[in-house]
Image (spheres, rainbow, N blue to C red):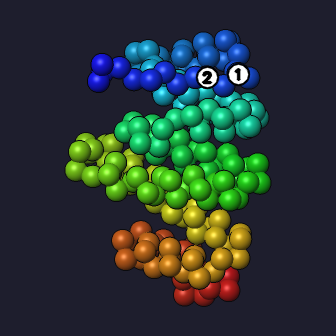
Amino acid sequence: WMGLQERIEIPAGVTSDEQQRARQDFRRVQQRDPDDVELLLVLAENLARRGRTELAVECAERIPVQDERCGLRSRLLLAQYCLCLNRAFRSERAVRELLAVAGATVGETAGGNERGAALAQVRTARELLVFLLSLQFRFEERRAVLRELRQGGLLGPLLTKLLCFPSL
């Protein structure tokens, strides 16, 4: 009973053709069938590419953020899709969800490639958070995030300018 996972439902607006296309896309790359979470992630990406961002958001939201394989990526995509839909607060929430679980996911249990991918997603999420805080005129919080990035050695040239020259 511990090996059984609860099935994750596909959003109602997703057609069977879209599901089949997502399965084929996944098989082509991974050489195996996707599970429910992987299917939702590929569906979200495909739907977003086709301009069906609302439905892509629904797919990404259904993926548990704690999922070791797809959780971080789903929240990063969710944040990006919500930003495209002018939902800055929902985008920020997705970024903060990602950052909250990132420590456990990026820990010692992850292999080399998985760890590198997770670290890249965390860095991208932090950069997105800086942007979202700037967008909402929350400069004190932005400064704190920039300091964290600097302490972690993740501060690139553009973000260094924001830290040193906050009015940019």
User: The residue under label 2 is which amino acid type?
Assistant: Ile
Q: Secondary structure at mark 1?
A: loop
Q: Which residue is mark 2?
A: 10
Instruction: Name the residue furthest front.
Output: 1
Q: Quadrant of residue 53?
A: top right
Label 2, label 1: how far apart the Cα atoms are: 6 Å
Q: Which residue is mark 1?
A: 12
Residue count near mark 2 (Cα–Cα under 10 Å), binned few <14, some 14–19, many ≥20: some
Camera sees residue 98 = yes
Relative placement, left or right, of 148 versus 162 is left
Judge whether 143 appears above or below 16 on screen.
below
Front one among 5 and 140:
5
Q: Residue at x 54, y 87 (%)?
A: 164
Q: Quadrant of residue 21?
A: top right
Q: In the rendered picture of this protein, how many numbered marks are placed on residues?
A: 2
User: Residue 163 in the image: x percent, y percent?
Assistant: 54, 83
Relative placement, left or right, of 13 versus 162 is right
User: Residue 24 in the image: x percent, y percent?
Assistant: 54, 14
The quarter of the image holding the N terminus is top left
User: Residue 66 in the image: x percent, y percent?
Assistant: 41, 42
Residue count near mark 1 (Cα–Cα under 10 Å), binned few <14, some 14–19, many ≥20: few
Q: Residue at x 39, y 53 (%)?
A: 102
Label 2–label 1 contact, CB within 8 A? yes
Q: Residue at x 27, y 44 (%)?
A: 110
User: The residue under label 1 is which amino acid type?
Assistant: Ala
Q: Secondary structure at mark 2?
A: loop
Camera sees residue 161 = no
Relative placement, left or right, of 10 versus 63 is right
Judge whether 113 appears above or below 102 on screen.
above
Q: Residue at x 75, y 33 (%)?
A: 52
Front one among 73 and 60:
60
> What numbered label is drawn on residue 160?
none
